[in-house]
Amino acid sequence: MMINNSITAKQAADMLCQADNILIICHKNPDGDTLGSAAGLMHALKKLGKTCAVLCNDEIAPKYDFMGIELFTKQFEPQFTVAVDVADTKLFGERTLPYSEVVDLCIDHHPSNSGYAKIVCCDDAMPATAQLMVSVVENMGVELDGTIADCLYTGIMTDTGCFKYSATSAQTHREAAKLMDAGAQHTMISTKFFMSRSRKTMELEKYALNTMEFLYDDRCAVIVLDDEILRQIGAQPGDIDGISAIPRSIEGVDIGITIRQIDEGKFKISVRTSENADACAIAQGLGGGGHVRAAGCEVIGSLDCAKKAILREVENALCL
Amino acid sequence: MMINNSITAKQAADMLCQADNILIICHKNPDGDTLGSAAGLMHALKKLGKTCAVLCNDEIAPKYDFMGIELFTKQFEPQFTVAVDVADTKLFGERTLPYSEVVDLCIDHHPSNSGYAKIVCCDDAMPATAQLMVSVVENMGVELDGTIADCLYTGIMTDTGCFKYSATSAQTHREAAKLMDAGAQHTMISTKFFMSRSRKTMELEKYALNTMEFLYDDRCAVIVLDDEILRQIGAQPGDIDGISAIPRSIEGVDIGITIRQIDEGKFKISVRTSENADACAIAQGLGGGGHVRAAGCEVIGSLDCAKKAILREVENALCL
């Protein structure tokens, strides 16, 4: 990442303290980290008496209701725009895209951050933007409370796969301890995000396991969820979140691919890799991005084309 | 738990410091917590120049090789016997049972600890015996090193379901941070225990999802793994570990039951519950024990009898 206009968490906090009428933008297909970071920042800014709200391109799943996110409905004229966990303008959606040109500050942890914002506070050593946001909030002089802690704990917990992924550090555990001391409801959050799956998720997992394809001496596993099966099961985006971790989780699999139809002739491809392959490089081959172990891209065309395209990238990565 | 002969971690450390020729005993069907706690203690005692070794009733799966456990082969005459994570004499196996009468100290975290040992150091607020063992080792005056940290981090990580379960506290995260600072190999451990499943585990999960039965208005889900399917898949105990978490993980399920044949006419039943039921009480109904959310028991008889017996306990628990 070569971003010249980058600042520290302390400097980001100072910028936010000087601003008001603040619009906070999440990435599309929002997850626990972008929402938790946005909500945590929103509550912190409100504690400082600021006017602020969150803009999200897509509908937010009910499981995030506890975050108490106040959505932006043009109730004020934004004077400062901050994007959280949004690495690239491609991650803006139809509704947020108009703001992509005027982002004053981006707070992020993706190594693939494109530097589209005027100022960037991006630390790619952090396993979650929410962990960076703990520093930002503290540097704003805001005391962590139960609500802020719930939001930031959710961000850390979800983006580290519940403290599983390799970017998890001793510092991650220390921040988690701090957030629990501040009142983060560990059990509520872990139950919601890690200990329960909907019947629809279960049906999807069953389908995934029953149909998973193993390729290249079992070094790659592929799941395909097309419109037909998604309709048949009645799956919502929230039901699908965990599926993309399945193929890579099988012993010996270096590259796990999940191809999910998101529209007529449009597919979202999730790439998960072991230490033997670079997920970000694979996704970037098709115009996507992300992290070294987890990345994604979108492909327009037929399912057959999408699959062939991603498998070409997989073959490159496996030097076949 | 009413145990009169109970002591603190500091007192347990003092006892261990005064002892030598120490036999460390694990519970049967050993898991990450009993093995990690035993191995961590073993390495700490060795740093103090003590003679010690670990006795485990069953073969230890290769995935625990990194712990460097030195097995007891009668290479010395035990003068002090410590059982770790062993709540009850029922958790001794054929090979360890002779020692169950002479356990000088039991270090444990199970609320169902039966107090069979001469002295008990049991803190049921701890999510893992390994978390308690961190205190014991520190109180022994042993500096944590990478090897000890690997063992204890594994115990904490596995018994908290990777920091998911409700007993996880801020202190758990602080101890985890401390162990990572001391050199615990987070990525190696999380990959081994939480990010990879064998093909056989995958086959078992597929079978479990395809055959899971939902009972009592879907408040109970049951998986049965009989000898035939275990043989057909060629599953080893290590492949089966995670399966028992599946039924309870389905939304709306309060009681998840996994019945696994362990011998001709002998079944191990795992019970997992939501906050709406007491797993330990259900397991105790059939002579077992454990924690409030995770417990187990063994039943002798036909599969049909075992299933009927446990479902009677489930009906009681659901007040049906």
Image (tube, coloured by chain):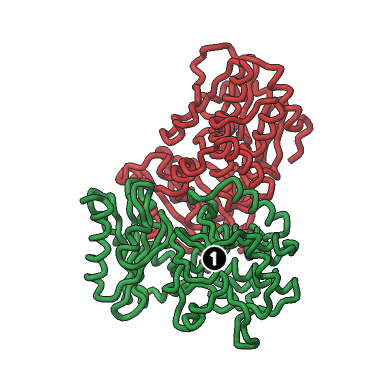
Chain colours: A green, B red
Q: In which image quadrant can residue A120 be found? A: bottom right
The N terminus of chain A - image quarter: bottom left
Position of residue A67 in the picture relative to residue A267 (left or right): right
User: Secondary structure beneath disc 1?
Assistant: strand
Viewed as shown, does residue B157 lie left or right of A318? right
> Which residue extends farthest right?
B4
Q: Is B226 situated above or below B141?
A: below
What is the x, y in percent for residue B156? 59, 42
The quarter holding residue B37 reads top right
Say if B224 sits above or below B38 in the image: below
From the top left corner, tell me how far across and down residue A71 is, in percent. Answer: 61, 81
Q: Amino acid at mark 1?
A: Val
Q: Quadrant of residue A154?
A: bottom right
Q: Residue at x 61, y 74 (%)?
A: A65
Q: Residue at x 70, y 20 (%)?
A: B17
- Give the percent coordinates (x, y) of residue B251: 52, 65
Dot 1 surroundings within 10 Å: few (below 14), some, or many (20 or more)?
A: many
Q: Residue at x 57, y 21 (%)?
A: B98
Q: Which residue is labeled 1 in the image?
A: A120
Between A217 and A200, the one lying in front of the other is: A217
A314, A200: nearer the viewer: A314
> Which residue occupies the foreground of this view, A285 or A115?
A115
